[in-house]
Image (cartoon, rainbow, N blue to C red):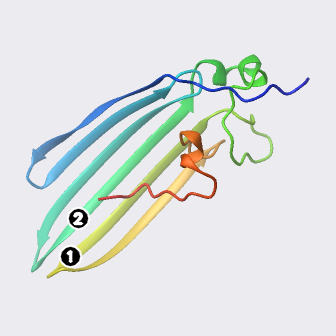
Amino acid sequence: GSSASSRDSNKFYYAGGDYKVNKDLTLQYYYGNLDDFYKQHFLGLIHNWQIGPGVLKTDLRAFDSSSDGKNGSRSGRADGYVSSGYYGSGVTKGEVDNRAFSGLFTYTVSGHSIGAGYQILNGDSDFPFLNRGDGEGSTASRLTD
């Protein structure tokens, strides 16, 4: 079949919030939906633990991104409702399917910090960004303050 031009959406829905359990623990949940392209759930946990003279900060994050509406059907993708990015062999090209998990552990003493982190992405598509992350070649970090 012939390839249709890419489609746009002007409907992005976003909601969520942070819940401060106590001064050292924050839980987060956010939901985003780009109509006819993808939906994304985000869960986060931030914890500060006083250890000796410093503080160990734990920052855990999970993203679950999947197709929505026309991106979830073969005919919708043929009409241009696709996500750009890298797709390996044997996967449905253009369909959003990604899970990302990350953890960052940072120990801080007197303004000095040392940290260790780990991140894993899986699924059949790249992590989805609006407008490809607002520019070609942009970089993004899923661990932020």
In three-dimensional space, the C-alpha distance between marks 2 and 1, rounded to whole angstroms, equals: 8 Å
Quadrant showing the C terminus:
bottom left
Which residue is at a point 49% across and 48% down the rendered structure image?
A: 100
Q: Is mark 2 on a helix, strand or loop?
A: strand
**18 up-or-down from 86: above or below:** above
What residue is pinned by disc 1?
108
Which residue is at a point 17% across and 61% down the rendered structure image? 48
Q: In the image, is 73 to the left or to the right of 132?
A: right
Instruction: Locate residue 46, reporting x and y percent.
Output: 24, 54
Considering depth in this image, is 79 or 38 the residue closer to the camera? 79
**Marks 2 and 1, the one that precedes in the sequence:** 2
Disc 2 to disc 1: CB gap under 8 Å: yes
Q: Where is residue 78 in the image (x, y as percent from the top left)?
A: 79, 23
The quarter holding residue 20 reads top left
Tell me which amino acid carries mark 2: Lys
Locate the N terminus and report the quarter of the image it occupies: top right
| Mark linked to residue 142 | none
Q: Residues within 10 Å of mark 1 (few under 14, many from 20)?
A: some
